[in-house]
Every structure is written in C-alpha cells, then in structure tokens.
Image: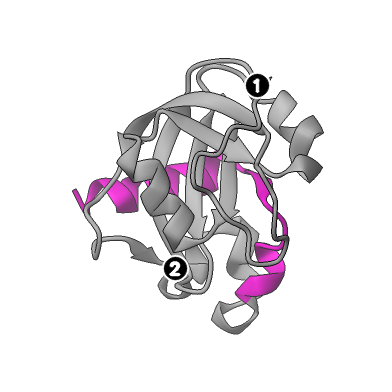
Amino acid sequence: MQAWIQVGSPDNFEKLRERNFDVSAFKASRRKQSGEMKPGDRIVYYLTKEVLFGGIVEVTGEMFEDTSDIGLRSAGKPGEDYPFRIDTKPLVIPERGNYIDVRDITDLLDKTRKLGPKKLGIAFRGNLHRISDADYEAIEQLLQERL
C-alpha cells in the first residue's frame, strides 16, 4: 500500500463528498503519478487555503481517463477538467468542522517537520504527493479520533 496526499480546494473536496467519494480526479499534469496508483492505496485530502486534512479514501481501481465534468475547478488553471481518475471508496471522512489543522501537527509529520507551520505551502505544492507510512498512520489516527 502506498499513501498519497492529494492537494485540492475545499470546494472540490465537498464536490467529492457529494459523490460519496466514489472517485478521485487529478489534473492533466498528473498522468504518470495517478497511473502509479493501485487498488489498496490510500489518498489523504489536503485542503488548500484552509490548511486542513479532510479525510482519507481507498483506491479501488486503476487510473482511467475521462473528461466529463464532475464539478471540480482549478483556480490556477481555468478549464482544467481533471481527466485522470481513479475509483475510490471513503475510509475516514469526518464531518465538516472536524478536519485536522495541519499547522497544529507539523512536528508530527516527516513531510512538514523541517518546514514548520509557516512554510507549509512549500510541502504541498502540486496536486499529488507520496507520503511515508509513518505520516499516513499519524494522519489516519488523528482523523479517526475526529469521527
């Protein structure tokens, strides 16, 4: 199992919630990375601007290409259709308001420890990141406590 962080807007996260997290969609620039995902992998959602971990899904299929509109939008790239998609199912999805503020846990994660809470933007540039098993386990435990 490989754990990933998907960076996206809070609005896009809520669009996926409306679909019961049946799919994750990635920007056109993430074909290679999304193609490396396998069933059983985990995706942690990092919500930009709010600096929150919103939840975790499990990958249930292989990557496929689909440009139909599922309501996701990119502020930095108007017209982005998030063509690379993977079927998923929700694993740990707290209610709105119970997400994890990443600034409060920077010292717990390998990915953020050296940067601290003021430089988190550097750690989460781009749409998709691999993370260590230790980071995944820490995030999952914290989200479980919020259910």
Q: Where residue 96 sits in the image (x, y, percent)?
A: 25, 59
Mark 2 / mark 1, whichever is N-terminal: 1
Residue type, mark 1 in image: Met
Residue 135 is one of the magenta-drawn residues: yes
Depth check, front residue: 69 or 38: 69
Residue at the (57%, 47%) spot, across then down: 5
Residue at the (44%, 42%) spot, across then down: 137
Q: Where residue 93 sits in the image (x, y, percent)?
A: 29, 44
What residue is pinned by disc 2? 105
Say if 21 sits above or below 5 in the image.
above
Residue type, mark 2 in image: Ile
Task: Tell me the element at label 1.
Answer: loop
Residue 113 is one of the magenta-drawn residues: no
What residue is pinned by disc 1? 63
Residue at the (57%, 26%) spot, across then down: 86
Say if 74 sits above or below 88 in the image.
below
Extreme residue in the bottom direction: 118
Depth check, front residue: 64 or 62: 64
Q: Which mark is residue 45?
A: none
Closer to the observer: label 2 or label 1?
1
Which stretch appears magenta? 120-147
Say if 2 sits above or below 6 in the image.
above
| Neighbours of disc 2 within 10 Å: few (<14), some (14-19), many (20+) | some
Is 36 left, or right, of 61 in this rendering? right
Q: Where residue 29 sits in the image (x, y, percent)?
A: 80, 44
Q: Where residue 107 sits in the image (x, y, percent)?
A: 51, 69
Quadrant where the N terminus sits is top right
